[in-house]
Image: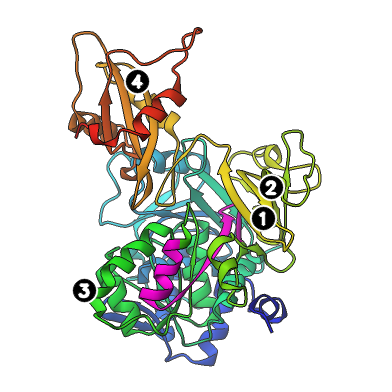
């Protein structure tokens, strides 16, 4: 039986995270649930932390249906808060701890949250929570007295999770999901490597956002897997933990996979990750050569995935696919999911015709935070979500991505909207004109370069540029990593910067970086 069929035929856990975890707790309370470096927590210990976080939330007056925003990286106290939020019937918004203040405030302003949990002892400087929202350090929540209560009943329209994504519009988007979509996406991922209760899965990032939360926190707690993570991303440490705890599955962007391959000889010597049945990889361009290196040097299969935060776990290759299909295709839809390509008029195209990729299925988003029309604008007449990516569907039903319509820079799987960075740089007194473009990078796929035409008689250095952007709250991931100065940027007859010409010049001349 194929992995795809076993996923469809498995009777999944209760959809609500807290209810699903309760079932695993009852089955084996002393089973390890979480490993972070040299610390570990059993299911019973996680349940105790969650009961304490629940006591803190109830004491703060948080009620069913309210929204909780939390800086999140799959720490023990973060997981406890997520379980407590699910038990109350609240909506959970896990945001990366590295997110800049500017973006945090953007999300908080639109969230209507009644509770904000910050990672450090004090909230980030410059944070402006919604009026009346309670604020607490996440670690302080687990000092409260434990409270036990049944899982709140919520309707089919309940928004359980709002994941923040780098999106395509500069400011982050809040992607809204219900428990049923989260459960489907987690089961789809679990089935790719047939992860069983008590087996370990490897966390490679913060685990925030809708996919990260679903693939690590939800999958681990709801399906009884051991969640294993390093204190921070360090390929040497991640390899060590994966090997020590016999991790059977993980998911990551290609950049991370390459780092693990490169670090393996120094960390494991001749050994490989022989217990790792599969690694799911997506988020940016991935070469067949990288997949073959992982197979040969790490000893694991790579399953390419095409999906988005808006439609999680949608298409993947499977272990039962041929080696050539796994190396070159971007996957086939999971159970009850569909995929098609469309022309600019919204008409569906045929097999092997290139168009914009559309997706629909059980994990399709419910909507965007504070943007009631945002989803509708991206839907076809027959209910497909338009991705902005260009691709084709092969006769065998695989999707093959060939490019993208969006003017985005994708750095190691992270979307950088050039327009956002440009608008901030225009505020610098030394900048007359600016354009931000991507340039090739062997590790990250692309990096961002700021090309600036200074005000006459002025100049700007690389460190000055990054300090200025940091002062405006831009996240580190979005910072240009190269600066070029030009006496005059090329313009069209109507005065628009010829971005394609700049991109071509920058992309073919990386040696001139001014850093």
Q: Give the percent coordinates (x, y) of residue 483.
A: 26, 30
Image marks 2 and 1: residues in contact by CB distance under 8 Å: yes
Q: Secondary structure at mark 2?
A: strand
Choose mark 2 or mark 1, whichever is in front.
2
Q: Give the percent coordinates (x, y) of residue 103.
A: 40, 40
Q: CA distance from mark 2 to mark 4?
A: 34 Å
Q: CA distance from mark 2 to mark 1?
A: 8 Å
The residue stretch that appears in magenta: 289-314
**From what the image shows, is residue 320 above or below residue 387?**
below
**From what the image shows, is residue 424 above or below residue 124?**
above
Q: Is residue 48 visible?
A: yes
Image marks 2 and 4: residues in contact by CB distance under 8 Å: no
Q: Earlier in the sequence, mark 1 or mark 3?
A: 3
Q: Is residue 49 visible?
A: no
Choose mark 1 or mark 3, whichever is in front.
3
Q: Give the percent coordinates (x, y) of residue 64.
A: 59, 60
333 and 8: which one is in front?
333
Q: Earlier in the sequence, mark 4 or mark 1?
A: 1
The residue singled out by tag 4 in the image is 426
Q: Secondary structure at mark 4?
A: loop
89 and 393: which one is in front?
393
- Label 3: few (<14), some or many (≥20) within 10 Å? few
The residue singled out by tag 3 in the image is 266
Quarter holding the C terminus is: top left
Choose mark 4 or mark 3, whichever is in front.
3
Image marks 1 and 3: residues in contact by CB distance under 8 Å: no
The residue singled out by tag 1 in the image is 364
The residue located at (75%, 65%) in the rendering is 336
Q: Earlier in the sequence, mark 2 or mark 4?
A: 2
The residue singled out by tag 2 in the image is 385
Quarter holding the N terminus is: bottom right
Q: CA distance from mark 2 to mark 3?
A: 44 Å
């Amino acid at each position: 039986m194929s992995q795809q069929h076993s996923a469809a035929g498995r009777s999944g856990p209760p959809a609500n995270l807290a209810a699903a975890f309760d079932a695993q707790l009852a089955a084996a309370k002393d089973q390890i649930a979480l490993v972070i470096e040299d610390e570990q927590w059993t299911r019973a210990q996680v349940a105790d932390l969650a009961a304490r976080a629940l006591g803190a939330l109830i004491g703060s007056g948080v009620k069913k249906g309210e929204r909780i925003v939390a800086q999140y990286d799959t720490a023990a106290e973060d997981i406890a808060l997520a379980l407590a939020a699910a038990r109350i019937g609240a909506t959970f918004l896990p945001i990366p701890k590295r997110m800049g203040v500017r973006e945090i405030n953007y999300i908080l302003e639109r969230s209507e949250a009644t509770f904000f949990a910050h990672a450090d002892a004090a909230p980030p400087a410059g944070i402006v929570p919604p009026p009346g929202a309670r604020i607490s350090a996440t670690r302080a929540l687990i000092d409260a007295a434990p409270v036990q209560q049944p899982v709140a009943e919520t309707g089919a329209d309940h928004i359980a999770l709002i994941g923040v994504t780098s999106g395509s519009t500069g400011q982050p988007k809040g992607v809204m999901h219900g428990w049923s979509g989260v459960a489907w996406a987690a089961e789809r991922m679990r089935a790719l490597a047939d992860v069983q209760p008590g087996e370990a899965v490897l966390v490679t990032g913060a685990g925030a956002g809708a996919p990260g939360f679903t693939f690590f926190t939800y999958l681990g707690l709801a399906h009884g897997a051991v969640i294993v993570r390093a204190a921070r991303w360090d390929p040497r440490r991640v390899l060590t933990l994966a090997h020590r705890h016999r991790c059977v599955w993980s998911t990551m962007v290609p950049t991370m996979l390459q780092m693990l391959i490169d670090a393996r000889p120094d960390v494991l010597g001749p050994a490989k990750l022989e217990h790792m049945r599969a690694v799911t990889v997506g988020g940016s361009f991935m070469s067949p050569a990288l997949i073959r290196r992982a197979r040969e040097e790490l000893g694991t299969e790579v399953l390419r995935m095409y999906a988005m935060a808006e439609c999680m776990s949608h298409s993947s290759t499977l272990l039962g696919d041929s080696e050539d299909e796994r190396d070159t295709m971007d996957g086939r839809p999971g159970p009850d999911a569909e995929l098609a390509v469309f022309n600019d008029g919204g008409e569906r195209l045929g097999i092997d015709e290139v168009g914009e990729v559309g997706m629909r299925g059980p994990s399709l988003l419910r909507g965007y935070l504070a943007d009631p029309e945002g989803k509708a604008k991206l839907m076809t007449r027959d209910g497909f979500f338009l991705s902005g990516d260009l691709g084709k569907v092969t006769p065998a039903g695989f999707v093959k991505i060939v490019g993208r319509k969006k003017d985005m820079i994708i750095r190691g799987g992270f979307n950088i909207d050039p327009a956002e960075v440009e608008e901030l740089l225009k505020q610098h007194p030394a900048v007359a004109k600016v354009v931000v473009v991507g340039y090739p990078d062997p590790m990250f796929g692309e990096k961002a370069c700021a090309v600036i035409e200074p005000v006459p008689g002025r100049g700007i250095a690389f460190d000055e540029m990054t300090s200025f952007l940091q002062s405006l709250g831009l996240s580190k991931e979005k910072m240009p990593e190269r600066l070029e100065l030009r006496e005059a940027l090329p313009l069209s007859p109507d005065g628009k910067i010829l971005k394609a010409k700049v991109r071509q010049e920058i992309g073919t001349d990386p040696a001139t970086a001014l850093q």
